[in-house]
Amino acid sequence: MSPSSLTTAGVVLVTVPGVAFGGVTLLKFLTRNVPGYADNPVRRGLWRAGHAHAGVLVLLALVAMIYVDQAALPDGLKALTRTLIVAAPILMPLGFFLSVVRPSDTRPNRLILLTTAGGACLAAGTLMLGVGLLLA
């Protein structure tokens, strides 16, 4: 792996304890019947989605780093691909969590658009990586 991919993978791995902490927090909310979580289906659903997306997308980003260096892409596009793929597990969960921060929120606020931005980053990054691998 290139130094850039190794560094990116290292940064992504450092986020895993945060995802684990989020899971423990959600478990605490469920087992202790924390007001504003168990009794708020919108907030509960979005926070669950945020945690799930964080975990899955972190794993995808780690696997993708192995392939970026194998892709037939110029160095600048490889860097952009790394950035886009790593942006997804940051932006999407943030959108889910921050769109219903207050326990009384029953509708997501505008920060839900971060999920769309994360999805766009994911789509663009994986498309570039896929095309680069097909051309290799």
Image (cartoon, grey):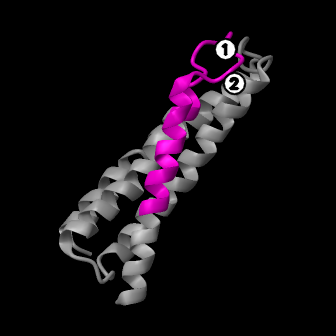
Q: Residue at x 20, y 67 (%)?
A: 76
Q: Quadrant of residue 46?
A: top right
- Answer left or right for 2 relative to 118: left
The tag earlier along the polypeptide, 1 or 2, is 2
Q: Amino acid at mark 2?
A: Arg
Q: CA distance from mark 1 to mark 2?
A: 7 Å
- Answer left or right for 38 relative to 50: right
Quadrant into which the C terminus falls: bottom left
Q: Which residue carries the number 1 mark?
A: 105
Q: Amino acid at mark 1?
A: Asp
Q: Is residue 83 magenta?
A: no
Dominant secondary structure of the residues highlighted in magenta in the image: helix
Q: Is any atom of residue 37 visible in this view?
A: yes
Q: Which residues are magenta?
A: 95-124
Q: Residue at x 45, y 76 (%)?
A: 130
> What x and y, as percent, mark residue 65?
36, 68
> What x and y, as percent, mark residue 45?
73, 33
Q: Residue at x 72, y 15 (%)?
A: 34
**SS at mark 1 in the image:** loop
CB-based contact (under 8 Å), mark 1 and mark 2? yes
Q: Is any atom of residue 63 visible in this view?
A: no
Q: Quadrant of residue 80?
A: bottom left
Q: Which residue carries the number 2 mark?
A: 43
> What x and y, as percent, mark residue 5?
27, 66
**Which of 71/21 is in front?**
71
